[in-house]
Image (tube, grey):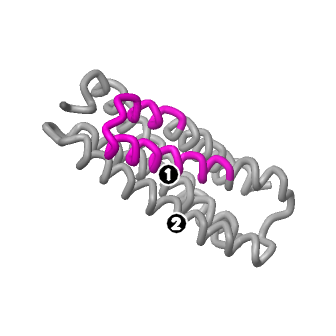
Amino acid sequence: MNPTIGWSNFLSAETGAAAALAGLIFVAVSINVGKILQFPAATARAFEALALLIGVLFLGTFGLAPNQSARTLGTEFLGVGGVLWLMFVVLHAGQLRHGRTKARWYWVLNRIALCQFAALSFCIAGILLIRGNPHAMYWLIPGCIASFASAMSSAWVLLIEILR
């Protein structure tokens, strides 16, 4: 059974939105590259936003590929989520270790929580698909929302706040 029956519109919309938002991040970085390079936390934020959006782009692309088994699609989702999770653990642990943030509570809520939630949602979707759970695809929804929320917050910082 194809696990993506009924999900093609959602996957297409998420893929298109992720590609558009990734373009916004690239524009933000190119406009303010001098300022962004002055702050290691800003370069990390740009990387984080792009990684989340490219993750959603990959998930949508995998999901739109025809005639995949649930096990294959689950493995792809778990791979994307796992790579994102590992990258964020390394990135955020390094930033916390070096004290590169002023408002820790906001940083933890906005950056770490959203990134981890998105990555782990994708992992859960993958694991549930591998196990044959018919509701696995629903875990993409909160993961995509968290990815977009984090990326939009980062885009605002990289376009506007960095100039303050």
Residue in view at x 47 percent, y 45 percent: 124
Nearest the eye: 162 or 106: 106
Amino acid carrying label 2: it is Leu
Residue in view at x 52 percent, y 66 percent: 86
Amino acid carrying label 1: it is Leu
Judging by the rendered image, the residue that carries numbered circle 1 is 52
Measured as percent of width and height from the top left, residue 73 is found at 27, 45
First in sequence: mark 2 vs mark 1: 1
Measured as percent of width and height from the top left, residue 159 is found at 64, 50
Residue that sits furthest to the top in the current view: 6
Residue in view at x 71 percent, y 48 percent: 110
Q: CA distance from mark 2 to mark 1?
A: 12 Å
Let me know if residue 52 is in the magenta part: no
Nearest the eye: 31 or 20: 20
Let me know if residue 124 is in the magenta part: yes
Question: Where, by quadrant of the figure, is residue 162 drawn?
Answer: bottom right
Q: Within 10 Å of the Cα at label 2, are there few (<14), some (14-19), or many (20+) other Cα atoms?
A: few
Compared to residue 46, the image places residue 134 above or below, namely above
Residue that sits furthest to the bottom in the current view: 98
Q: Quadrant of the C terminus?
A: bottom right
Nearer mark to the viewer, of 2 and 1: 2
Compared to residue 144, the image places residue 86 above or below, namely below
Q: Which residues are magenta?
A: 113-142
By secondary structure, the bulk of the magenta-drawn segment is best described as helix
Q: Within 10 Å of the Cα at label 1, are there few (<14), some (14-19), or many (20+) other Cα atoms?
A: many
Judging by the rendered image, the residue that carries numbered circle 2 is 86
Measured as percent of width and height from the top left, residue 36 is found at 65, 65
- Along the horizontal axis of the image, is 78 left or right of 102? left
Local SS, label 1: helix
Residue that sits furthest to the left in the current view: 67
